[in-house]
Image: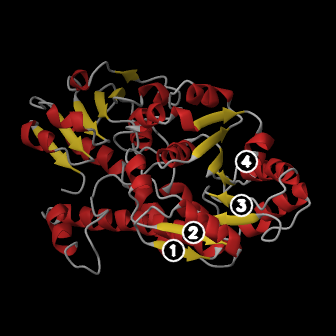
Amino acid sequence: MKISIIGCGYVGTVTGVCFASFGHDIVFYDIDEKKLDLLARGESPIYEPSLEDLIQKNRQRLVTTSDLTAAVRDTDITFICVGTPSRDDGSIDLTYILSAGATIGKALRETPDFHPVIVKSTVFPGSTEGPIRSALEEASGKQAFVDFGLGSNPEFLREGNAVHDFCVPDRIVLGAGDARTMRALGDLYASFACPKIETSIRTAEMIKYTSNAFLATKISFANEIGNLAKKLGIDAEEVFAGVGLDNRIGPAFFRTGIGFGGSCFPKDVRALIAGAGDHHETLQILHAALRVNEDQPLKLVQLLQAHIPDLKGRRIGILGLAFKPDTDDIRESRAIPVIRALLDAGAVVVAYDPLAMESFSKIFPEIEYAPSAQAVLTADAVLITTEWEEFERLNYSGTTVIDGRRIAAASKTADIYEGVCW
């Protein structure tokens, strides 16, 4: 099948390259010429382990274009993978996806055959059949579900594991409003052996939001229990090892620490809350999950101040700036509120991350960036905010460590060690 991918960010690049590895021909489109140039040279516009190797192996199946009309006209199916950022009130901004929809609609005028348009971007339930459908129909002069297809195929990609998650998924969700689009999606994913859910477009959209909201809530719940367990002299890891063996609950995402960040969980929970508000529903559990997550990283600073009450002029090290290991993504990184609190207290901050220092320096140009993790250990105290594997190889002797990510080497070798929930 020949597939056009609209948007070469995280989701679009991974989706297109992985589809190519399954034998499909891909046409990438993006308004950012730099991303297209990188892909054309066989390089990845994003950091993701093993993705660039996959690009090199499938270069003959990957084409780039700055002509969106041609991308749609010359392919069998189109995936919309553009960003849906948050507005100030937490709701999603559909500006990019509606702009893409209008241009795709113009291309559909020149497409005589039935052409499915699949939304892979994360949108609130009703968005695809509402404003996105309207943009496509108005620009094309055609009717969705009759003259062209419309569907939803949400992604469940973890940064740092995205290639594996695409190629070996635990489930695939296919939402369509007509039989031809569902058949096209079924054919596209025919070789995948995992469970496949065929459902309505709105249900597919809701599955995505509900999955992320539940996982985010599970993390906040674990942290609330972990905060109490620490005060009771209990290690929360042992608690959740026991709780997770209940097959009604499961062990995943019960790792206590300083909370969740990234491009998905915070944004999607806020969007679900905002969208529910438009329908006069208050999602109280999700409001609480966000409050816990906002407070949790600041517990690092509170624990630090139990050892160093006055932080003014003290040199405090930060290990980890990315929101999680194996990515350079700093969106909603838990290091951000920690560093802000340290600076507000007058501390001098020195930080290290294997991948994220360049992008982080755009937010905090005033802090010092160390050449290595070892160099951070000369600070008066060290806070660990991302669980990079290399931090397990450090010797923390002579150091005061406040750990937000449970680095075993720190707990064994630091002179003074405290974990957030242990």
The answer to whether the residues at label 4 and label 3 have Cβ atoms under 8 Å apart is: no
Q: CA distance from mark 4 to mark 2?
A: 23 Å
Which numbered disc flags the more N-terminal residue, 1 or 2?
Answer: 2
* Eye-nearest disc, 4 or 2: 2
Q: Sort mark 3 into few (<14), some (14-19) or many (20+) by Cα contacts within 10 Å.
A: many
Residue located at (51% from left, 74% from top): 197
> Looking at numbered disc 4 in the image, what kind of residue is underneath it?
Tyr
Of the image marks 3 and 1, the number of the one nearer the N terminus: 3
Labels 4 and 3: the sequence-earlier one: 4
65 relative position to 208: left or right: right
The residue identified by callout 4 is: 96
Mark 1 and mark 2 in contact? Answer it, CB < 8 Å: yes
List the residue tagged with mark 3: 116
**Helix, strand or loop under label 1:** strand
Which residue is under mark 1?
197
Quarter of the figure with residue 126: bottom right
Q: Secondary structure at mark 4?
A: helix
- Vertical position of residue 243 compared to residue 61: above or below: below
Between discs 4 and 1, the one toward the N terminus: 4
Tell me the quarter of the image containing the C terminus.
Answer: bottom left
**How far apart in space, not on screen, are marks 4 and 3 (Cα)?**
19 Å
Q: Amino acid at mark 2?
A: Leu
Q: Residue at x 50, y 64 (%)?
A: 190
Q: Are marks 3 and 1 in contact (CB under 8 Å)?
A: no
Note whether residue 309 is visible: no
Residue under numbered circle 2: 174
| Residue 112 in sight | yes
* Residue 247 vs residue 93, the one in the foreground: 247
**Vertical placement of residue 98 versus 9, above or below:** below
Mark 3 residue type:
Pro
Determine whether the residue tagged by mark 2 lies in a helix, strand or loop.
strand
